[in-house]
Image: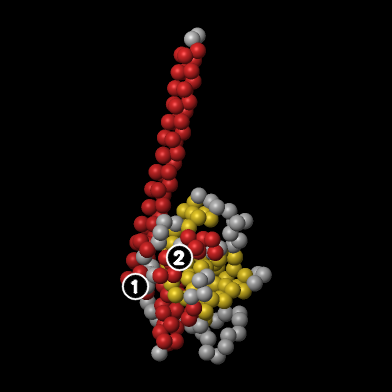
Amino acid sequence: MDIKWLIIIVFASLLLIAILILAILAFLQQKRIKQYQKIKTNYQKEINLAKTAFNKNLNPIKIKYELPDNEICYLQQKIKGTILSQKKIKKNLFLFELKDDQQFLLTNLNGFLNFRSHKENPDYHGDIYLTNQRVLIDEVNKAITIWLADIITVLPTILNINDTFQPGLLLITKQKSVYCFWTDDVKMGLRINELSQQKRGQKGD
């Protein structure tokens, strides 16, 4: 066979393989976008419904810990999440600029947050307690306290955890810390948002 034709066949074969690979990648990306949009749309519907039916009345609950006299617990449940690294925070500085009327809208979220590996983003697993003073995350090895007066934004989010999308919730503090919860419990986020706004209002009086 003529060397010229051999080169043409090899080049055409490589071009065909490249086109095929690009087509597969485009298909997978389109599938990924549709999955993200579906979860985002459903999550926003849940948020809108929860906001409409939200009851601001709070019922105290008893927990195993003894709290100060001026502290009352309103919520306890299992939680899983992580604290965002400074690298991720620097890529999402707009989170610290959201106003109160911009909270609980997924449209204010720039895409989604990627968590490629549990090893790169250590999780905390434990109970979360919401009181009139703070959010307390009680884990086996440590306890994390987030004071309500320090929370500046409560924002629902979409998480990409090892290429699987799921709803989440961000708590952003004035110390520029971002706590990320892997949960679709909209009511918990609304409750934290309500109490933190009340606490900031009391501090400003």
Q: Position of residue 205 (x, y in %)?
A: 40, 90
Q: Residue at x 59, y 62 (%)?
A: 123
- Residue 19 versus residue 110 in the image, above or below: above
Q: Residue at x 58, y 59 (%)?
A: 121
> Label 1, on which residue?
101
The answer to whether residue 80 is visible is: no
Q: Position of residue 12 (x, y in %)?
A: 44, 22
Could you tell whether 205 is left or right of 115 in the image?
left
Could you tell whether 134 is left or right of 198 in the image?
right
Q: Secondary structure at mark 1?
A: helix
Kindly give the residue lying farthest to the right in the view shown.
Answer: 141
Q: Residue at x 35, y 69 (%)?
A: 102
| 1 and 167: which is toward the camera | 1
Amino acid beneath label 1 = Asp
Amino acid beneath label 2 = Leu
> Label 2, on which residue?
93
Q: Earlier in the sequence, mark 2 or mark 1?
A: 2
Kindly give the residue lying farthest to the left in the view shown.
Answer: 52
Q: How far apart in space, not on screen, are marks 2 and 1 (Cα)? A: 18 Å
